[in-house]
Image (cartoon, grey):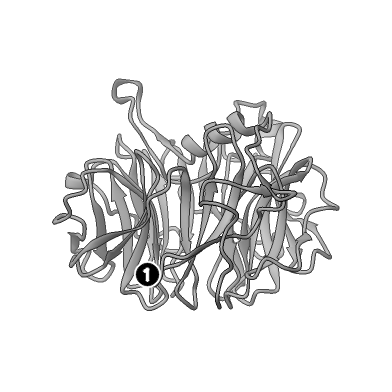
Amino acid sequence: MQPKKPCNSFSTKRNGGVCRFHHPLSFMILLLLIILAGLILLPPTKAIAQEISPTPPPPTLEPEIACLLDSNPVWSPDGQRIAFVSERSGNSDIWVMDADGTNLRNLTSTSEAEDISPLWSPDGRWIAFGSGRSGSGNVWLTNPDGTNLVNLSKDSMDIAGSPAWSPDGNYLAITSWQGGVWIIDIQSFARRNITEGSTDVEAYKWPSWSPDGQRIALTTYSNDRVLIANVDGSGIATLNDTKFNIRANWSPVNQFILVSHAIEIGGNIDIWLIDSDTSEAINLTEDYDGVDFWPAWSPDGGMFVFQSDREGLNDIWRMDTDGRNLINLTAEVEGSAWLSAWSPDGQKVAFQVFQESTSMIWVVDADGTNPINLSAVIPCVE
């Protein structure tokens, strides 16, 4: 694949042949959600937060409404179950249900702490999640039946987040507020800081593994540059040094990385495709002046879904990796759609919908047909 050259530079956007900036009214709200993305809020005596998930915190609601606060769906590797976050027990817990919305189970009801951001391991053995149950923001593991709770980031990684599984499920990468990107062996729970020898003193976020499991893409906190680190700790290099790269997401099959990139604070957010071998970048959504962000690759790497406000409310859109065949998957769903996740077979997409005072989990076929509200199937818990 040979990407075309962008309009002018990585920080401009073409419209009618003229490069210009755009300032949508919703941008500051969106930027705040991104900055606060999935933070684990610590006790008042320790007001520090760490990035874990893109889910904005829900408001305090009456019990009959709180049971409809379901968010952040992720599929099991076999496609038979979905893990998600719900407030239906009175606080934020990690739940699992069958893919049709039945057989609901609360995995983390043992604590009143906020549990967020479930992430199923590729081999199906574990679910990683963020929690403040130990008094600070940590990354925890649980088996899919709720047994064997393990705190992965205590001690030297007292405040940590952004967990990412290696393709084989044997390792988990997490970032630490104290510094560094850590690789944890899930068999022995041994860990090492792969950025320890770097001269770059910035904090890192959102690790994303290469398909061969040998490298990890990162973004930095202070100026949102895109970096690549070797998992053996042998080096870290800048892939793209433009500012406002919100997150890097490595393809499951090749060397390409999708990045949500803002032109400037108050400007457009676009989806860019970066070649990790050559650093060449192309803007895939340059024909729209607005907000396109949070891309997620299809399992075969041929398509991706992303969030966009191009038809008013936030919707989930699908696009081929060459920028063609744009489809709104949630055009028939009322409300604002967020946080899409592909099923392992690539046939369905799960997402959450904000509608009035509720947050619900939906699934839709990958062609935009057959949208189903799973939260309407799930019974409320007294």
For the point 56% across and 70% down, the residue is 3
Assess disc 1: are there few (<14), some (14-19) or many (≥20) residues with their C-alpha within 10 Å of its C-alpha: many
Q: Nearer the viewer, residue 306 or 376?
A: 306
Name the side, left or right, on which 268 lies relative to 203. Answer: right
Residue at which label 1 appears? 166
Residue lying furthest right in this view?
332
Please tell me whether mark 1 sits on a helix, a strand or a loop.
loop
Q: Which residue is drawn at 21% across and 68% down?
A: 188
Q: In this view, does 228 lie above or below 10?
A: below
Q: Position of residue 83 (x, y in %)?
A: 55, 58
Image quadrant holding the C terminus, namely top right
Outermost residue to the top: 45
Residue 61: x, y in percent? 65, 26
The answer to whether residue 127 is visible is yes
**Visible in this render: residue 145?**
no
Q: Where is residue 149 in the image (x, y as percent from the top left)?
A: 34, 55
Give the residue type at disc 1.
Ser
